[in-house]
Amino acid sequence: MKFERFQHLVRMMFLPDAAGNIRTRYEHVDATHIHPLVLAYVGDAYFHLYVRMRLLSYEQAQVQALHSFSAQIVSALWQAHAYRAISDMLTEEEQTIYRRARNTKSHAPRSASVADYHTSTGFEALLGSLYIRKEHERLEEIAEAAFQIIAKEMMNQQEQTHGN
């Protein structure tokens, strides 16, 4: 980020409102006007936290194991797999948010195929949109469905690899 842009953001973040209070929350953010990649940024953060909290049901002491396992679960590969499995449960509006983000130009990392990366970006944007719109029940429903799908598929893969 260029320094001038950074300075502008800092000034905007600390502008007082009409009452002289510093605006520190996002109550006045309209999810429909946020760039799809920003929605994905928020959704990625949410899904990371969701997965980490779910993993606490199984492990509370080994931070490195928690980090490693959660990083696998939130990878583009697994998010894309989960999205494909839950796509039928989405409303038309949710599918539109997904498609808008999936089709936004971005650069896939080397760790994922372009198709999986774009699919996971759409999935994350959907989560981000639900979070910003405070649709917490629906957000939880979709995140849990994705978590269950990923967990089952990882278990199947583990069994196939180790012949159990």
Image (tube, rainbow, N blue to C red):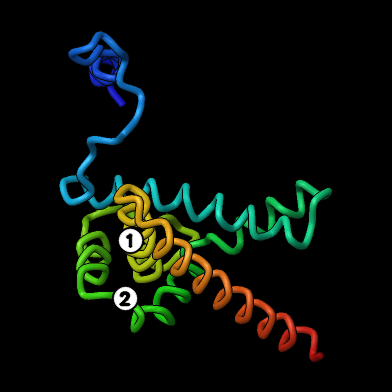
User: Is residue 51 found left or right of 15 in the rendered image?
Assistant: right
SS class, disc 1: helix
Q: Name the residue that disc number 2 marks.
A: 90
Q: In this view, does 109 lie above or below 10?
A: below
Give how far across and how far down residue 11 sits, in percent: 26, 13
Give how far across and how far down residue 104 sits, in percent: 21, 57
Question: Residue drawn 79% across and 91% down?
Answer: 163
Question: Residue drawn 69% across and 59% down?
Answer: 55
Residue 40 seen by the camera: no
Q: Residue furthest top?
A: 20
Q: Name the residue that disc number 1 marks.
A: 126
Give how far across and how far down residue 112 sits, in percent: 46, 64
* Nearer to me, 142 or 1: 142
Q: In this view, does 81 lie above or below 36?
A: below
Disc 2 marks a residue whose amino acid type is Leu
User: Which badge, 2 or 1, is on the more N-terminal residue?
Assistant: 2
Count residues near mark 2 (Cα–Cα under 10 Å), then give few for <14, some for 14-19, many for 20+. Answer: some
Residue 53 seen by the camera: yes
